[in-house]
Amino acid sequence: MAQANVKTTFTHADRKIVRCLEELDELFRTGADATVSSGNDGELLLPYFLTRSHSAFLAGVRIVAGGQVAESYLLSRGCLEHALYAFFICDHPERALTWAKRVDGKVAARKCRDLFTAGNMKKCLVSKHEKLGVIASHLYDRTIQYGAPPNASDWLTTTDTHNRGGSSQMLAAGTAAWRLAMQTVAQAAACSIRIFGLLYGERFQALGVAKRLKRFDEFLMKCGDHGSETGC
């Protein structure tokens, strides 16, 4: 049924929505052509984080198009987290070693967990680019609120409370909750590409990514409007 929902979504969805998702995919792909400009550990990891962020976005589109609303927030969170990790490491390249050594035992794992917290990474971005940092923080918090991890908001938006005792819904295509999830997938992608734009700088400008991203700025500013439908 989820696969059938995906086909139905892209057959009948507003062309503006489909084009929005397609263009975000194109921006990720174009950005991947940017070169690494230095040998520090943060720069060397940029292609990895960009690719993983892009992959999470694509998976999120597929999942939410299928109607799996709550699950899509896990992927939107992943899309954002890879961008936030990249920014946090590039701000202090020595953090790359702490991140890479997480597998070297309990002490190393604890050190990495204590450093790479969502709070630390969001504060880092806000300190360098307040406007984008606030948007990223809001979107990240939304992914937590609506499905990553399980919580009451997730339950309330995916439950048919008209039935006695409530009936949990795995698929919720076409609902208000579905529209917000689709909006979040797109906004998380646009925000993540913008973060990578700060890191790649002139290289994104040379590829035309920065210029094309400007049209998503107004869309990002709407990230607090839960009542709006996805549209670009």
Image: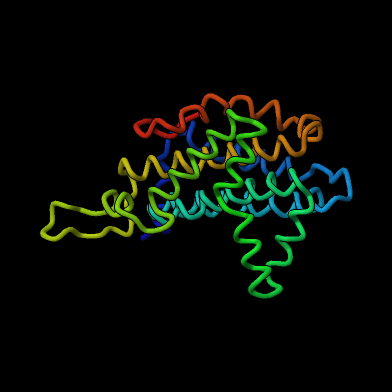
Residue 228, position as x, y percentages in the image: 38, 30
Q: What's the image's color scheme? A: rainbow
Relative depth, front residue between 148 and 63: 148
Q: Which residue is drawn at 29% across and 48% down?
A: 157
Q: As drawn, which residue projects farthest toward the left?
A: 164
Relative depth, front residue between 34 and 49: 49
74 shown above or below 27 = below
Q: Residue at x 55, y 50 (%)?
A: 118
Residue 152, position as x, y percentages in the image: 29, 53
Q: As drawn, which residue projects farthest toward the bottom?
A: 105
Residue 112, position as x, y percentages in the image: 65, 61
Looking at the figure, which quarter contains the N terminus? bottom left
Left or right for 186, reference 33 = left
Relative depth, front residue between 47 and 198: 198
47 shown above or below 128 = below
144 shown above or below 2 = above
Tell me how many marks there are: 0
The image quarter in which residue 171 lies: bottom left
Relative depth, front residue between 190 and 4: 190
62 shown above or below 185 = below
Q: Residue at x 39, y 33 (%)?
A: 229
The image quarter in which residue 23 lies: top right
Left or right for 217, reference 7 = right
Q: Which residue is drawn at 69% across and 52% down?
A: 49
Residue 121, position as x, y percentages in the image: 61, 46
